[in-house]
Image: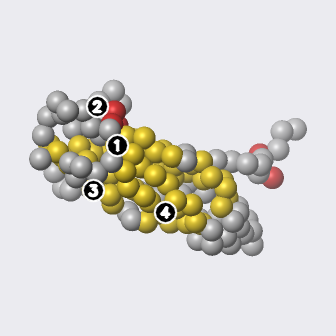
Amino acid sequence: MKKLSCLFLAFGLLLPQAAHANRAEVMILPPRVVMENNDRYATIVVRNIGDAAGDFTVGLQDMKMRETGMVVPPDPGETPPYSAMPYLHITPKSMTLKPGETQSVRLMVRVPENLEPGEYRAGSSTTMPMRRPMPWARMR
């Protein structure tokens, strides 16, 4: 049986800010998506659980599971043997969310007919790119 699995980890790479400043924070549901043979897409929800608006970018990346069960990125130059990356597409990849707002993100899969049976994996990361220079980063 062919099975594609995506683990959605919210790596909220938030900018350092003063203690009194508001900030955007991300939550992704569901945290894990399993797609079986006939599945062509799945929907995940990205939610800003912070108290400020934020620009978020969702991306896919290869992941591998260690013997301990920990899921980690592969070593540089390594491609896991059951990578789902060639078969996945995610849209939209970027969004701006106000506090409490959500965005549905579609994960689409195209599986070739001759795909070797197995569990194929990919991971996701959510980042918040820097929008403005931080006060401590001023050029003089």
Q: Which residue is mark 2?
A: 79
Instruction: Give me the residue at 83% from left, 39% from top.
Output: 139
User: Which numbered mark, 2 or 3, is in the foreground of this view?
Assistant: 3
Numbered circle sitting on residue 75: none
* Separation of marks 3 and 1 at Cα, in angstroms: 11 Å
Residue 114: image location, x then y, percent:
17, 30
Label 3: state its secondary structure: strand
Q: Which residue is mark 3?
A: 34
Residue 7: image location, x then y, percent:
34, 54
* Separation of marks 1 and 2 at Cα, in angstroms: 19 Å
Instruction: Give me the residue at 63% from left, 68% from top.
Output: 101
* Separation of marks 3 and 4 at Cα, in angstroms: 15 Å
- Label 4: few (<14), some or many (≥20) within 10 Å? some
Residue 95 sits above or below residue 53 on the image:
above
Q: Which residue is mark 1?
A: 109
Whether pointer 2 and pointer 4 mark residues with C-beta atoms closer than 8 Å, the reply is: no
Query: Does any portion of residue 62 appear in the rendered image?
Result: no
